[in-house]
Image: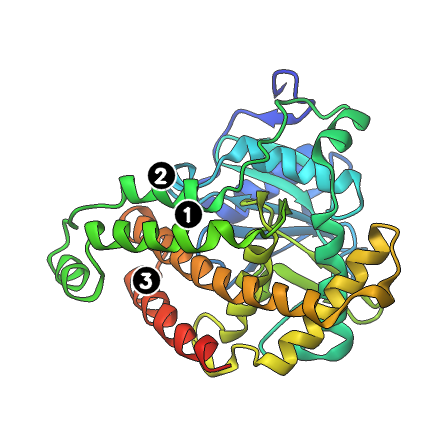
Amino acid sequence: MDVGAGEGITTFDFRIELADAESGSLKLTQLIRPKWSTDDIKQKRFTGGITNTLMGCWHKDDPAQEEMILVRIYGANTELIIDRNAEMRNIRLLHAVGCSKPLFARFANGVAYGFFPGACLDENTVRDPVISRLVAQQLVKIHSIDTDEVMKQNHIAGPAMSRKPMVFDRIWEWLEIIPDEFNDAEKNKRYKTEVRSKPQLKRELEDLQRQLEPLGSPVVFCHNDLLLGNIVYNDKKGVLVFIDFEYGAYNYEAFDIGNHFAEYAGVDDLDYARYPDRDYQLKWLRAYLECKAVQQGSDSSKVTDRDVEVLYVQVNKFALAANFFWGVWALIQACNSTIDFDYLGYVTMYTAGEYGMYVIIKHS
């Protein structure tokens, strides 16, 4: 065991292979909680993730699982798309401001951190008026974080976080590493027939960037991956939190909101008819702007219809950028991931989604 250089993070120099997820996470849990005996530790594997493998370990005397330790085993080659050192910083930074459970340790191919009991949102619960307002409030809290100040006050080591919006730089980087072809003949056939070519994607990205950058959306610290499974609500406590800050970085405010709205369509059962209509969005965005005004010490009653309309336009245009972002992400995963998931089908869904959303947005 050692402590990462200057980071203050407990680090273990072993790997947990996917085939040994149960025994490996048990071993790690006992290193973190040496007073817990093997017989007292209960485990479960969380399902639904398409990037990593997630195990939960808790003491049998903790039925509410308040002290559960989550062990995340990184997916193969995910370092191509995720900066794991930045992820460690994000967890510590967000824990310092009460927006994340603590980071316990990292190991060669994963991390262990705290668990927030509750249920992930779905296509129905996200529309609950109480819950949707809590999402807006939590997003304002995240967007209001001054990362440099938090890192300084809490002695979190590392370079200052770049304030440059991440979305377009990241997509350009990813476009350079997507494959020209796949070794698997069937997968390659689908790739050539169902996915737009790399030159075409680059032209479309240039056009998208040219249209969106002048919109004037504020640049703030963003979650950048607010799918419904990354939002947890504890109905007993009436508390809502965001989880999984792997992509946390400075970005356009409207991207974070637009990406969240796009996720209303779902993943496995994609239906863009569930994309929020104009009336729903205007109410949601007004709640967001009112919370933002209070956070900044202003009068929430001064939020105007024009303020809401401007944000509405920005958000819906950036929702298209979010679909582009995750479509390119899925191309990289299709080439590298060992998880049993149809990433090319995922690309196709997002490709269709860009046009489906365009029609919805155009007529809303």
Q: Nearer the viewer, mark 3 or mark 2?
A: 2
At a point 64% along the width and 80% down the height, the residue shown is 280
**Disc 1 and disc 3 in contact, CB within 8 angstroms:** no
Q: In this figure, what is the number of numbered marks?
A: 3
Q: Is residue 267 visible?
A: yes
Give the amino acid at mark 2: Glu
- The N terminus is located in which quarter? top right
Examine the rendered structure and indicate whether residue 313 appears above or below residue 54.
below
Residue 38 percent coordinates (x, y): 67, 44
Label 3 vs 2, first from the N-terminus? 2
Q: Of helix, strand and loop, which one carries label 2?
A: helix
Which quadrant of the figure has residue 304? bottom right
Report the colour scheme. Answer: rainbow
Q: Which mark is residue 19?
A: 1
Label 1 vs 3, first from the N-terminus? 1
| Residue denoted by label 2 | 173
Label 2 vs 1, first from the N-terminus? 1
Q: Is residue 52 visible?
A: no
**Disc 2 and disc 1 in contact, CB within 8 angstroms:** no
Q: Which mark is residue 347?
A: 3
Q: Of helix, strand and loop, which one carries label 3?
A: helix
Left or right, 203 with respect to 229, comes to left
Left or right, 72 with respect to 344, comes to right
